[in-house]
Amino acid sequence: MEIEPGPIGVFDSGYGGLTILNEIRRAMPDYNYLYLGDNARAPYGTRSFDVVFDFTRQAVEELFARGCRLVVLACNTASAKALRTIQQQVLPGLYPDHRVLGVIRPTVEVLGEESSGGHVGLLATPGTVRSHSYQLEIEKLHPGMYLTEQACPMWVPLVETGEASGQGADYFVKKYIDAIMKRDPEIDTIVLGCTHYPLLLPKIRKYTPEGIKILAQGEIVGKSLRDYMHRHPEIDCLCSRGGNVDFLTTEAAEGFNRMASIFTGIPVKSTRITL
Ligand code: DGL
């Protein structure tokens, strides 16, 4: 049976994955995309392993049902807590022709070139920090690199509630940056290990000591996905072209449209679904 090509699925718990979608589209403008934000159940970062796995699996299967053959988990928390189990236990039996990719591995891959002194700071959700997924990947790819992990539990709620550029955000941005710099004053590179955090970038820059590199994942993931497509023509041919992007959310569409239009710079008309 001939398999119809479908859009590339991009999934996040809420708005954060839009920072990844923007950069993937910049790197690969000709493809079609279907974005799904599980805004009704965000944030994921404070939830248990089992819950994040269940929610992520539902979202991935929804995107498959809507024709996606390739889904990017544009969410570190889902990548940390659900990706491996989906890849190893769900896809082989049920969806052998589908692929799911995450954002942690491509980010860790570039750290060798990006960090000048081998002292890296990770700012992420409590779930990603507790999983130690970055530490484990770093041990494999860059033994000798020194990682300090800092959970920033208030940052995603600030973004999801539209407070990222409000005055109240300054307090919590400064708090976690001060905390990580105190734990390792030699940090030369800070990874924004949550796709929501680029939306706080102006404030993160303001409170990060000068000379420290701040790495957001969008560009890294966009480039890595383009390379992946070149290496995997059998998947590339299952991804449709046309340059369209459609949006799904599990919360009210109006609120999503307003916020997502700001974050993507394009008019967004989303559809509300239940998972
Ligand atoms: N944007 C997500 C991440 O990269 C998750 C945020 C959340 O839902 O807590 O981790």
Image (cartoon, rainbow, N blue to C red):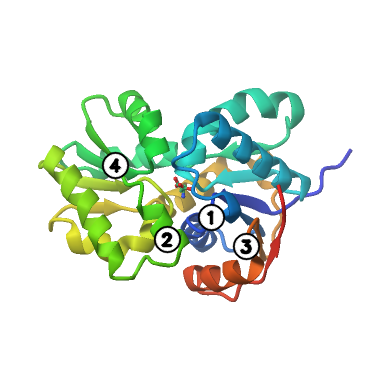
- Mark nearer the viewer, 3 or 4: 4
Q: Residues within 10 Å of mark 4 (few under 14, many from 20)?
A: many
Q: CA distance from mark 3 to mark 2?
A: 29 Å
In-front residue for pair 196/4: 196
Mark 2 neighbour class, 10 Å CA radius: few under 14, some 14 to 19, many 20 or more: many
Q: Earlier in the sequence, mark 3 or mark 4?
A: 3
Crowding near the residue tagged with mark 3, few <14, some 14–19, many ≥20 C-alpha atoms within 10 Å: few
Which label was assigned to residue 30?
Answer: 3
Q: Relative to 45, say whether 144 is above or below.
A: above
Q: CA distance from mark 1 to mark 2?
A: 9 Å
Which sits earlier in the primary sequence, circle 1 or circle 4?
A: 1
Q: Left of 98 or right of it: where is 182? A: left
* Label 3 vs 1, first from the N-terminus: 1
Label 3 or label 2, whichever lies nearer to me, is 2
Element type where label 4 sits in the image: strand
Image quadrant containing the N terminus: top right
Q: Which residue is located at x 36 percent, y 54 percent?
A: 155
Residue 188 can be seen in this image: no
- Amino acid, disc 3: Asp
The residue pinned by badge 2 equals 159
Q: Residue at x 72, y 56 (%)?
A: 273
142 over 268 or under it: above or below: above
Residue type, numbered disc 4: Leu
Image marks 1 and 4: residues in contact by CB distance under 8 Å:
no
